[in-house]
Amino acid sequence: MLEARFVRENIDAVRRAMDDRHAVWDFESFLLLDEERRTLIGKVEVRQARRNEASRLIGGLMKDGLRDEAEALKAEVRAINDELTAYEVHLDRVDEEVTDLLMTIPNLPHASVPVGADENDNIEVRRWGTPPEFEYPPKAHWDLGPELGIIDFERGVKLAGARFVLMGGMGARLERALINFMLDLHTSRGYKEWWPPVLANGDTLRGTGQLPKFEDDLFKTSDGLYLIPTAEVVLTNIHRDEVLEAEGLPRRYTAYTPCFREEAGSAGRDTRGMIRVHQFDKVELVKLARPEESMDELESMVADATLVLEKLGLAYRVIVLCTGDMGFSAAKTYDIEVWLPSYTAYKEISSCSNCWDFQARRASIKYRSPGEFKGSRLVHTLNGSGLAVGRTVAAIIENYQQADGSVVVPEALRPYMGGVEVITAEI
RNA sequence: GGAGAGUUGGCCGAGUCGGUUGAAGGCGCUCGCCUGCUAAGCGAGUAAAGGGCUUGAAGCCCUUUCGAGGGUUCGAAUCCCUCACUCUCCGCCA
């Protein structure tokens, strides 16, 4: 969320930022409502001040036994209250409309973000590793997995529906091994591990920006809870409505959770395999940082996420998203893409964003630093996948496949696989 | 699920026969004094959000906020209702 005053006072810059994002936002309504709101506040507050004054006087008059004078004042306040009620009802409505509008404006892109329309304007930052070459036509994980008996797409559909996956045997083991591998790696590098709820309330989803604008992307329970689409939601909201001490920053958090997405609007995209499913596992990284350090923390977060791929020996590239391709809450985003032979392309496996103070303002996450400044200031929040586990499974199966249909287990993972070096067909 | 207790400022914690209580006191923090250093001590200050005036900055005025919402009243942290959450006891249970 952006502040109403900030938008009002920087209207041209905000307009330009929205143009850069190719986002549409109703500036005209905002300016009108904002003006109306401030006018109403003035009218309400003048009357409240008079009421407070009169009430004080009444208290004094009653003590002195001057009942008649007190009654006259009471009558005046009653009249003021009638007026006040009408103005307050109006103000509440306008206030809500302003807030609703502000909740739907996306974050401002950081100055370092390239301006562009869509994913074609994203800029590659670096590459690591070499995509494997095969002396035979490599198979996709959606073929290899079922042939090995470790991924069962058909029964996943039977159990739950389209875009749900069932894994068994070494497939399930690989999933679990990756989760532990990633968590161990991140915790060894200073991230604190959490085990959060995977259902969250509306305030939590509003805090990170999924609500109110993207409710269609979420699974919702009958009593108003949401299945989290990412652990970012709960990890970032851990400190909602809190004031943190500066010396405790940056906070670096990690968690493994299942993630749930409706994938509404992505019909026809990535329909094969386990690239785009309703339920997937992810190890998430979240940081709460001081504003002046948040950009450095974004860079190091990308390094933390890519280290997973390097340890696994998977080729990847890092791109910086252009203004037109960034998510709602992000001020700057790096995507990490892993090489997938089935796509003969790099495919997103992590997205690392600095959300600046956008989420912190929604969720009211502040910090204080006595001696440096008075009061408290908003922190910056960052999040990134470290990594999406299902896509990592797919990448390993495809990149480490052998001519005989078996899959070599990356060395770094073998301790987590009970020493298994090769995955072969099983029943 | 049943019964009871509770929810106050960065933190702890007072505060009901409703009226300068935005809220005692303490901790923490800031500034000053004192002190070979440190510690201790003394004095002053220290909530947030919103609106307005002014501005280089500071500042000033007003409003709101004592879990959330609603009600009673001229006036509510204080009384009433609803809801949420926390704790204790009972029941049930992976």
Image: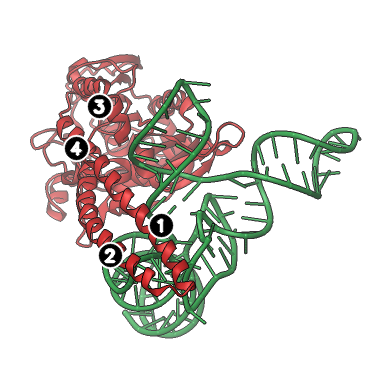
Chain colours: A red, B green
| Residue A88 as seen in the image, left or right of residue A419 | left
Q: Earlier in the sequence, mark 2 or mark 4?
A: 2
Residue at x 18% of width, y 47% of height? A164
How far is the residue under mark 2 from the one under mark 4? 62 Å
Q: Earlier in the sequence, mark 2 or mark 1?
A: 1
Is residue A159 at least partly visible in the picture? yes
Q: Name the residue that disc number 3 marks.
A: A326
Q: Which of A57 and A227 is in front in this view?
A: A57
Q: Name the residue that disc number 1 marks.
A: A53
Residue A152 x %, y %:
18, 46
From this view, report whether residue A388 is shown above or below residue A240.
above
Please identify the quarter of the rendering in which residue A297 is found: top left
Q: Which numbered disc covers residue A80?
A: none
Q: Name the residue that disc number 4 marks.
A: A276
Residue at x 15% of width, y 53% of height? A160
Q: What element carries label 3?
A: loop
Q: Quadrant of the N terminus of chain A?
A: top left
Are the numbered discs 3 and 1 placed on the same chain, yes or no? yes
Are the numbered discs 3 and 4 placed on the same chain, yes or no? yes
Q: What chain is tagged by disc 1? A: A
| Residue A113 as seen in the image, left or right of residue A187 | left
How far is the residue under mark 4 from the one under mark 1? 63 Å
Q: Name the residue that disc number 2 marks.
A: A78
Are the numbered discs 4 and 1 placed on the same chain, yes or no? yes
Quick one: label 1, few (<14), some, or many (20+) residues within 10 Å?
few
